[in-house]
Image: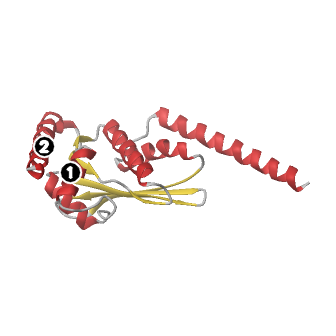
């Protein structure tokens, strides 16, 4: 019975998704999309989920997508299929989930931390063809709080849109902060060495 209620909820969510698409489809290059939780290495699952949510919000802000399936609906479908977020990170799984959700495109990605560097990669996959339509990669070295800005820029880049000035200004500020921090660390190291 529990499974049937989840299935009905997912079907209702998909109905509203399609309805929303019909209202907005004329001026958006992508009708429907789902974003799967990003694969993580060197960061926690919670951090990966937060970055995935922020990426989804940024995608919505690009106004390039008619409708994006909620993370809750995606998780319900994954649970029904006994698939965990961590294992659905390849194109074939993305296409399978995309078909179940009734979307045109699925985004998969990863956030990897190695030392002080973060590597973020995203692929936009066509559910119909199973092929990668767009792929973007971003490298970031700085305060982890700056990842929110970087992930937002990555979403705009994936949609082939010019990033808003506010995001570019945030990035510049984060870069200044990182430079200042690096200079402070270098000065402290020099003092300790003397």
Above or below — where is 9 with respect to 99? Answer: above
Q: Which mark is residue 76?
A: 1
Task: Identify which residue is drawn at 17% across, 51% down.
Answer: 103
User: Does residue 96 appear left or right of residue 87 in this picture?
Assistant: left
The answer to whether the residues at label 1 and label 2 have Cβ atoms under 8 Å apart is: yes
Q: Which residue is mark 2?
A: 9
Task: Identify which residue is drawn at 13% across, 43% down.
Answer: 9
Residue situated furthest right in the rendering: 194
Residue 96 lies, in percent from the top left, at 18, 62
| Front-lying residue, 117 or 165 | 117
Give the secondary structure at mark 2: helix
Quadrant of the image for the C terminus?
A: bottom right
Disc 1 to disc 2, C-alpha distance = 9 Å
Above or below — where is 152 with respect to 118? Answer: above
Give the secondary structure at mark 1: helix
Question: Residue 72, located in which quarter of the rendered image?
Answer: top left
Task: Identify which residue is drawn at 55% across, 40% down.
Answer: 171
Q: Mark 2: few, some, or many residues within 10 Å (few <14, many ≥20)?
A: some
Residue 76 lies, in percent from the top left, at 20, 51
Residue situated furthest front in the rendering: 1
Residue 92 lies, in percent from the top left, at 23, 67
| Front-lying residue, 191 or 45 | 45
Above or below — where is 104 with respect to 175? Answer: below
Task: Identify which residue is drawn at 41% across, 54% down.
Answer: 45
User: Does residue 104 appear left or right of residue 170 in this picture?
Assistant: left
Residue 100 lies, in percent from the top left, at 14, 56
């Amino acid at each position: 019975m529990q499974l049937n209620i989840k299935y009905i909820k997912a079907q209702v969510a998909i109905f509203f998704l399609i309805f929303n698409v019909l209202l907005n489809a004329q001026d958006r290059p992508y009708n429907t999309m789902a974003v799967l939780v990003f694969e993580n290495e060197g960061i926690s699952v919670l951090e990966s989920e937060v970055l995935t949510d922020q990426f989804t919000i940024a995608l919505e802000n690009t106004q390039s997508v008619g409708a994006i399936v909620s993370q809750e609906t995606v998780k319900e479908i994954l649970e029904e299929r006994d698939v965990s977020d961590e294992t659905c990170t390849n194109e074939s799984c993305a296409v399978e989930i995309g078909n179940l959700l009734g979307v045109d495109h699925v985004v998969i990605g990863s956030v990897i931390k190695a030392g002080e560097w973060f590597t973020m990669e995203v692929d936009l996959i066509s559910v119909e063809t199973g092929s990668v339509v767009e792929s973007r990669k971003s490298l970031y070295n700085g305060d982890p709080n700056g990842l929110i800005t970087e992930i937002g820029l990555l979403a705009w880049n994936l949609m082939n849109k010019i990033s808003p000035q506010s995001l570019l200004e945030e990035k510049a500020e984060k870069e200044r902060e990182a430079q200042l921090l690096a200079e402070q660390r270098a000065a402290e190291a020099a003092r300790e060495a003397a």
